Amino acid sequence: MRKIYIFARLASLIALVCTCVSVTNAQHVVGNGKISGEFGFNGMYYIPDSLIGAEPVDSKVRANTYLSLMYNNGGFTVGAQYEFYSFPLIDFEKIGYKGQGLTRYYFDYKHKIIQVTAGTFYEQFGNGFTLRSYEERQLGVDNSLLGARIKLTPYQGITIKGVWGIMRNNFDFDYIHRQDFVRGIDGEFAFGDIFPVIAEKGFTATIGGSFVSKYEKSDNDIYVDVFPGTEEETYGIIHADKIPANVASWSTRLNFGYKGFRFEAEFAQKVNDPNATNQYIYKNGNALFLSATYSMKGLGVSASFIRSDNMDFRSQRLALAKTPVLAINCIPAINRQYTYQLISNYSYASQPNGQIGAQLQVNYQIPKKTKLGGKYGTDITFNYSRFHDIDRKAVPLADSLGTMSGTDGYTSGFFKFGKKLLYQDVGVEISHRFDKRWKLILAYNYITYNMDVLQGHGGMLQGHLVSSDLTCKINNKHALRLELQHLYTKEDKGSWLYGMLEYSISPNWFISVGDQWNYGNSDKSHRIHYYNVSAAFVWHTTRIALNFGKTREGVLCIGGVCRSVPASYGMGLSVTTSF
Amino acid sequence: MKKLLVIIVLIFSFSVIYAQEEKEKKYPKLPAVDVKTVNGTTFNTSNISNDGKPVIISLWATWCKPCVAELVAIADVYDDWVEETGVKLYAISIDDSKTAARVAPFVSGKGWDYEVLQDPNWDFKRAMNVPDVPYLCILNGNGEIVWQHSSYAPGSEEEVYQELLKIIKK
C-alpha cells in the first residue's frame, strides 16, 4: 500500500516544489502574475454554564485559523493552504480537528484544450451522485482529493475529466497508512455548443456520464454487531476474502431545455459495497433525480423528485459518522433550505441509504404598479416537500446468528413510498416593499420532522413557524432590521420565541442584539434565554466580528449537511479577509 | 523540517505581496474558471464582458437572505443604472446540487433581468478567495476588478452606484 502513498506523495511534492519555486521567483514575474489569498480566524473565550450544558473546557481560549495563498500567471496556478487547530473550537475538537498542517498544495496548468492539476483538488461529476469532493469550512467537512486530475475540452461543448486521488479525512493526515484511493472519469456533451443550429432554435441539450471506482485493501475480517443500538454483544463475521476491494459506481445524466422550460434527470448505480452504514449488505445501490422547471419573467415553477437506495459511498468501508466523513459522492437533500433560527435545528438531512420524496416550489411576483403589487411588486413563494423512507422488505437472513450482513438485506419497490415519514414542509413567504423606507417579509411554515431518524431519538415533531423580517431604511446609510419568529410545538423542547434587532450603517457597521427564548419548555428551569450581542465591521473584503452570548446545543446545518454542536457560552471573535 | 519549509514559503509569499503593493497599483483580472449556465452548459468566466462598459459580479445563493436582499435592492434601480452607465450584472449562484435546479425559476419569480451563472462546486468562489456570500465586485471596461465588497447592509447599493459613475467618468 506504500505504493499508493508514494504516488500521491510524489504528485504533492511536485506541487509543493512548484509552489516554492514559483513563489520565490514571483518577484520577477509578479508584474504579469497575481498573488491572492484568504485568511480566516475564528476564536472563542468559553465560559462554563451548567444550565445550558456548556461544560468547562481545559483551555478556555480556542481558535480555528487558516491561511490560503494562490499565485496565478496566465495558465499557471499554484497554491497552498495552512490550517492551525492547536487549540481548536470545542465542536471541531470533537470531530477530530487537532494540530496544524499544510492541508492544501496544488499546481494547476491550463493550455487551450487541456487542464492538469497535481496535488489537492476539489471535483464534482454531474450532480455529485458518483463523485463530489468539496469543503464546508463551518461544518468541518473537507474531502478534497490528493492526487491528479486531467480535464480535456477537445471541442467546444465536449468536456472529459479524469481523476485519481486519496481522499482527505477532515483533519486526519495519516495518508501514509491509507489503503484506499478513488479514481473516476466523466464525460459531458453539450449539443447546443457542438451544433449551434440547435441553440439558434432555442433548444439546449446536454448528456453526460461518469464512472467512479474506489479501491480499498481487504485483509481483515469484519466483526458486525448483530444487534446494533442494543447492549447485547453478539458479533457476526464477514471474512476478508468476501469483502470486495473494488467498489464501482456510475451514472448517466440528461439536461434538456426549450425556451423557459427545462428538464433534468440523473440516474446512478453502485455495486458491491458492504459497509458500516448499510450493515454490510451486498445489495446494489441506486439513485434517481428528476427535475422539471418553468421560468418566465415574474413566474418560476419547479418540481423535483429524488429516490436513493443504499447509495452511501465512502472511501473507507468502516466509516460510520453521521456527517459525511470520507464521502465520495453526495446525494442531495432537495427540500427548500431555510435560514430561520428557530427551525435550523429541525432541518432535513439527506438520507443516501434510503429516501424517496419530492419538492414543489412556485415563485411568483405580483407585477409592479398594480393594486396588489404596489409600486415595487410583491413576491410570493409557495413550497411543499415530503420525504419518506424507501419501502423495504427483508430478505431471508444469511446465517443462524440472524444478521442480514452478507446478504442483499432487503428488496424495495422502486416507486413505492415507505411507511416512515422523514420530513414534510409546507411554506409560504410573502415579501413586499411599501415605499423607499419600509420593507416586510412574512412567512409561515408547517414542518413535520422525524427526530428518531434524523437525530437518533425523540419521536416525531410537528411545528408551526411564523416569522417576520421588517426593514426600515432610515436614509441611504442607516437602517434598522427587526426579525421576529415564533415556533409553536409540543414536542422536543417545546415552543420558542426569537427576536433580533440589527442596526446597520452602510457599508461598514452592523450591530445587533438578539434573544432565543425557550418559553415552552416543559421543564420550567430550562426556559432559558439564549441571548446574543454582536458587532461587525466590514471594509471591502475584510470582516471583523465580535459577539457575546449563548448558543444552544443542537444541529448545525448548512445546505442539507448537518452536524451536532455542543452548547456554548462566551465571547467570540472572527476575522476573515481576502486579498 | 516540514514546518520550517511552510514558514519559509509563507514569509516569501508575504514579501512578494509587499513587493506587489509597492509597484504602481495594478488591478487584477477575473480568474478563468469553468462555471455553468442555467441551461447546464459550460461557460468560462474569462468570457464575462460588456463591450467596454462596467460589469457587476455578485456571488449569491437562493438560501442566503442578505444576498437576495441585495439583488432585490439593485433590481429596483437596475433599469436606471443600465441607462446611465451601461452596466451588466452577472449573478453567479453558489447553490449546489441540492438547490441548483431551482435557481432559474427563483430568478424569474423575482423578475430579475440579470445574467445568471452557476458555480455548484464553488470553483469560482475558491478562485476568487471569497470566504462567504454575499460578495460583490465591479469590473471596469477592461475587465479589471476595481472594487469589491462582502456582506450587505441596506443602502450599500448606493456605494456601488457611485463606483460605477467613477468608472464611466474615467
Image (tube, coloured by chain):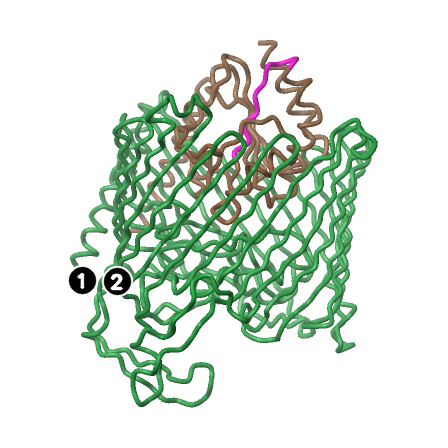
Chain colours: A green, B brown
Q: Which residues are magenta?
A: B83-92
Location of residue B89 in the rendering, given as x and y in whole percent from the top left corner: 57, 25
- Tell me the residue that label 2 is attached to: A178
Residue A1 seen anywhere in this rendered image of the structure: yes
For the view shown, which residue lies furthest in the top direction? Answer: B170
- Chain letter for mark 1: A
Say above or below: A124 vs A99: above
Q: Residues within 10 Å of mark 2 (few under 14, many from 20)?
A: some
Asked if the residue under mark 1 is in contact with the one under mark 2, i.e. CB atoms within 8 Å, the reply is: yes
Is B149 on the left or on the right of B35, as rendered?
right
On residue A1, which mark appears? 1
Mark 1 belongs to which amino acid?
A: Met
Is A402 a magenta residue?
no
Location of residue B154 in the rendering, given as x and y in whole percent from the top left corner: 72, 34
> Residue A438, located in which quarter of the rendered image?
top right
In front here: A192 or A174? Answer: A192
Mark 1 residue element? loop
Location of residue A53 in the rendering, given as x and y in whole percent from the top left corner: 64, 72
Is B148 on the left or on the right of B43, as rendered?
right
